[in-house]
Amino acid sequence: MPQINILPKHIAELIAAGEVVERPASIVKEIMENAIDAGADKITLEIKRGGITYIRITDNGCGIDRDNIRKAFISHATSKISTVDDLNAICTLGFRGEALASIAAVSRVEVMTRGENEDVGTRYCIEGGEETVLDEAGCPKGTTLIVRDLFYNTPARMKFLKKDVSEGNAVAAVVDRIALSHPEVSVRFIRDSKDVLFTSGDGKLDSAIYKVLGKDFASTLIPCDYELEGVRVSGYISKPFNARPNRMMQYFFLNDRFIKTRTGMVALEEAYKNSIMVGKFPACVLKIQIAPGAVDVNVHPAKTEVRFANEKMIFNAVYYCAKSALQQGDTRVQATFQQKVNRQFMPKPAEGKQIKIYEQQLEQIKKEAQPNQDFWTNTTSTEFKKTVESPKNETIVFNDNSSKFEIEKDEMPDLVPCFKPTVQEPDPVAQTKPEPVEIKPSIEPEPVQPIVEEVQHEVEPYRVIGEAFKTYILVEQGKKLLIIDKHAAHERMLFEKFKANRDGIETQMLLAPVTVTLSKEEYSAVLDNLDLLEKAGYYVEDFGGGMVIVNECPTAVADADLAEVIMELAGYLVTSQKELIPEKLDWIYHSTACRAAIKAGDRTSDYELNKFVESLLNNPDIRYCPHGRPVLIEMSRYEIEKNFGRV
């Protein structure tokens, strides 16, 4: 049997530090919680390089007396509990007495502190668990703690840290949670010499939400407050139509401590049942107040996981709090008007087509893009009408050897915008009605192409019968009936198109760039994967404060869906463990295709249906959507007649 050895002190401390100090964010959490326990109402945090090289936290709490400064850095030394009864009813954020000792074991720590009853402060330095300086110093009441060179003595731990930006965003996430859980504390966060966050400390939760999560997110919330059987739940929840694609914006606080609770999460989502779409999740900032003895927070060193004595009671309190708020609050949907066009199946004029159109109408179309003031001021409204109006039954004809489309004038949108020109003397030229001329397009249009560039196969003759429930396309082919799910088929077509054009996805520059508010984890994940998103057709930039701005996106994605697409992609990037770029790209293509595809219930023209079926039947590989659902099912004539008792 191998000999059992007692580990040296410094090795034992390094092992213990591994449970508490995982990254710079762990240090920030522990020290800021200590500051709040010390009675501070003002906390300033400054970090450099994501907190890896420099962390400074200053508070105006009670400080540490000179006689106690050494004890503070000994393992399991604390002023917060002293008996078993204290452990069973914890009212403070910290209580283990492990934080300072663990931090000092893996970094260089400097403390400047002065207690309430002291005239002179204390400067204390400790490196790798070894004291180096203990001296008097002039400083205000409170504590300033500086941590430098994290993991300088444990290179193996250092290599597991992420990029500076990612570590900094993890710190920002911790600061956000503390600012939300304690709105009575003014929090200032400085990151690489830039002020990132400053809360007023006025004690109002809505003020903290506005500062931390932004005005756009704050405007989507409704207040809630409910008490049941000694459990009080208060805060804010999102309106149903502002649901998000993931749970990243759900914040639960128990007795002013951030926690991860599946009980609260399930209760909240149950309250929204039948109010939001499947796959969508509500956002919230909820504070749960319960007797300290009814919960065990001594489960994990991070203290984010807790055990409730009565989980059913917590579930009911959260459920009824959210349910009552949804019934009483203003949850009306705000109308937005935006026409969605299926560009993929729109007919385009073929090469060599002749277009008959009045010259003045063509000139007017050009002037919409580049107005000519002289034209507007030299033409009266009456004369203009004479120039551009045409008979009610006028038809614009597209002639081609292979096709002919006739579009009634009444079915076309007006080509001329409404305006009120200045009345001047008539222009003789304007009174002359121009003769129709044949205009040849300056740029030769391309013929209509199917979404997927497929190899033409010998296709059995078919007939498109029509569409059922605005979802399924019915096709008769030989002695069978094909039922096609148009959303699943279109999704697969777009997915294959994106994959085939990895190096050149067609994008559109947005006239009005879209800003998206993300959680700090999502924000960090997006910034870490900007190149990946660019390959997928999304040109995204950092907008600061947990927001990103989208300047370009794939042409297949509607502007109205863009913010939700970015949130969904961000949630995937947070949770994905895949390191292979092609696999991540495939998921992004899949998500984009799902969003851009024709939806069940969308109106589809006969022309689109025919092009749709043509593309599908010419590509036998398109038989399942990226989710794995079938694109089409076949029913033989025999099966149908058997069901009707004909055979």
Image: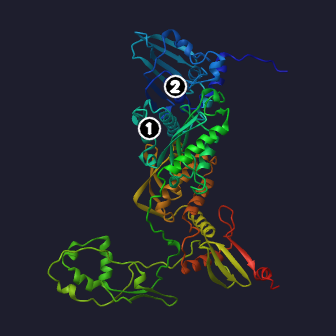
- Residue 89 is marked as none
Sequence-first tag of 2 and 1: 2
User: Residue 568's spot in the image, x, y percent?
Assistant: 55, 53
User: Residue 35's spot in the image, x, y percent?
Assistant: 49, 24
Residue linked to disc 2: 31
Residue at disc 1, secondary structure: helix
Asked if one can make out residue 459 in the rendered structure from this viewpoint, the answer is no
Name the foreground residue: 196 vs 180: 180
Q: Residue at x 67, y 37 (%)?
A: 311
Tell me the distance, in whole angstroms, between the alpha carbons under discs 2 and 1: 20 Å
Residue linked to disc 1: 208
Q: Residue at x 27, y 71 (%)?
A: 371
Examine the rendered structure and indicate whether residue 43 appears above or below residue 67: below
Q: Amino acid at mark 1?
A: Ala
User: Residue 157's spot in the image, x, y percent?
Assistant: 61, 31
Name the foreground residue: 547 vs 421: 421
Name the foreground residue: 350 vs 466: 466
Examine the rendered structure and indicate whether residue 356 appears above or below residue 243: below
Q: Residue at x 63, y 26 (%)?
A: 293
Q: Is residue 268 left or right of residue 351?
A: right
Residue 261 lies in quadrant? top right
User: Residue 323's spot in the image, x, y percent?
Assistant: 56, 48
